[in-house]
Image (cartoon, helix red, strand yellow):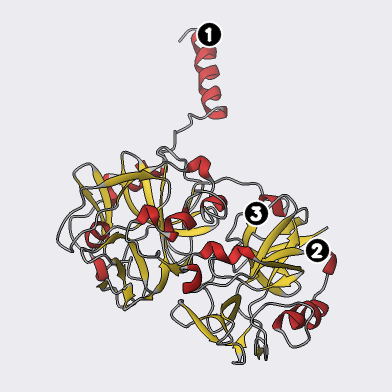
Amino acid sequence: MSLVGIYTYRLVHYYRIENPKQVEKLSLDKQITLEKNITTKDDGLYHIDDKYVFKGNDVDNYLEFSGILWRILSINNGQIKLISNDNLSSLVWGYKTDDFTKSYIYNWLNKNGKNTGILESVLNKEYLVSDSYCIDSIKKDIKCENKKNMLIGLLSLEEYEEAKGSNSYLNNQTNFYTINSSTDNKVWYIDDKGMLNNNSVNNGVYQTLGIRPTITLKSGLKLISGNGKKQTPYKVEDVNVKTLKDVFVGSYINYSGYTFKAMSKDSKRLKVVMSDVIPKKEMSYSNYDVNYDPVSYDNIGYYLNNDFYNSLKNKDYLVKGVWYTGSYNSDSKYDYKNVYKSKVSSYIGLLHVGDLFINESDNYFTLTPFNDFEQTVYTIKENGTIFADLITSSKNIRPSLYLDINLKVLEGNGTISSPYKIGR
């Protein structure tokens, strides 16, 4: 070998050592749909025509997005369709309608005027695409034909059955709506046994059931971390969290010895709710007033804004906020937007009907009145549904509050096992 050849060889050899060839990573949709991950029997990922579908119970299809835990329903042309792992709220479907696009649920999910799009407002829409949703009124054995494009929807009967129904990961032992109505002008839902039911309205009495939204991620998203297991879900968002401005809704935060969950934010404040109820503390709402009142001694609002408030450390972390106190009943045709018609301002409040994450604890008061004459306010039952109970009954307390949006995040990763620690 000539001298020139030797030096050329060495130059190339050492260049390759110092600059190894970068292997291009597959996008999340392509990694999930690799041939080795496909099954033709039992639980797992199935390849059906041009679509990939998860079926059965034992499937690693967890994905965290916008601070919320989701399950992957299917992958079609690289687009990943998700359903929330849990019910994100509970509402009446609608009043004298079975049309999803005219329902309260549609308005709660999608921006469609004032006080709508409660969920849409907290999602990272840069990653989302609109999808085609089945909105047919159908029988159990009829496949969907009538479809509509929208950003956020609900599970269809066809998708539920395709995943193996009650024998699948979609059966989470709660009551939640599907997107389809039945032929007798009622709405199909999945009950807490995983069975199909359409008793959403019975003799004029409207059921309040869970909301499990579905969304679709655009194709080609990079996998940041995770392997699809519940403890290590797939993640596609790469966010550098420095202050509460950067925190996703759904993230956990440690404040004054309690763990709180982020619910919403604006330019000044982050609204959070205690991840569980105050330990070993039960009390009545009031002896005579269904309205949340921070200055009336005989009211849960007074306890929260005095006794509880005074027990907190770093009170300068808190900012005052608005708490909506409108009623929710047949007089307003069960329209959740009526809740926003009255309000009070204080440091500490409670959740109201229509809030995110209202189902995650039970046996506690909300601040939404049902009926002044009957002296009842809404509480959360053990199965996650809402129930009007007497204000004199004894319930758990699940406080909500507003944190200064400029607080620094000092450590933690925002999970319940490692909540963000905050400071100045």
Neighbor class of circle 2 (other Cα within 10 Å; few <14, some 14-19, many 20+) is some
- Quadrant position of residue 24: top left
> Which of pointers 3 and 2 lies earlier in the amino acid sequence?
3
Which residue type does callout 1 highlight?
Leu
Examine the rendering and report whether any part of residue 419 can be seen.
Answer: no
State the CA–CA distance, disc 2 to disc 1.
Answer: 71 Å
Q: Secondary structure at mark 1?
A: helix
For label 1, the crowd category at 10 Å Cα-Cα, with few meaning under 14, some 14 to 19 and many 20 or more, is few
Foreground mark, 3 or 1, reads 3
Under circle 3, the secondary element is loop
Badge 3 or badge 1: first in the primary sequence: 1
Task: Please name the residue that numbered disc 1 is placed on.
Answer: 3
Q: Which residue is mark 2?
A: 317
- Above or below, comparing residue 391 to residue 257 in the picture: below
Q: Quadrant of the C terminus?
A: bottom right
Which residue type does callout 2 highlight?
Tyr
Above or below, comparing residue 136 to residue 372 in the picture: above
**Residue at the spot of label 3:** 247
- Residue 359, image x and y in percent? 50, 73
In this rendered view, identify the residue nearer to me: 319 or 302.
302
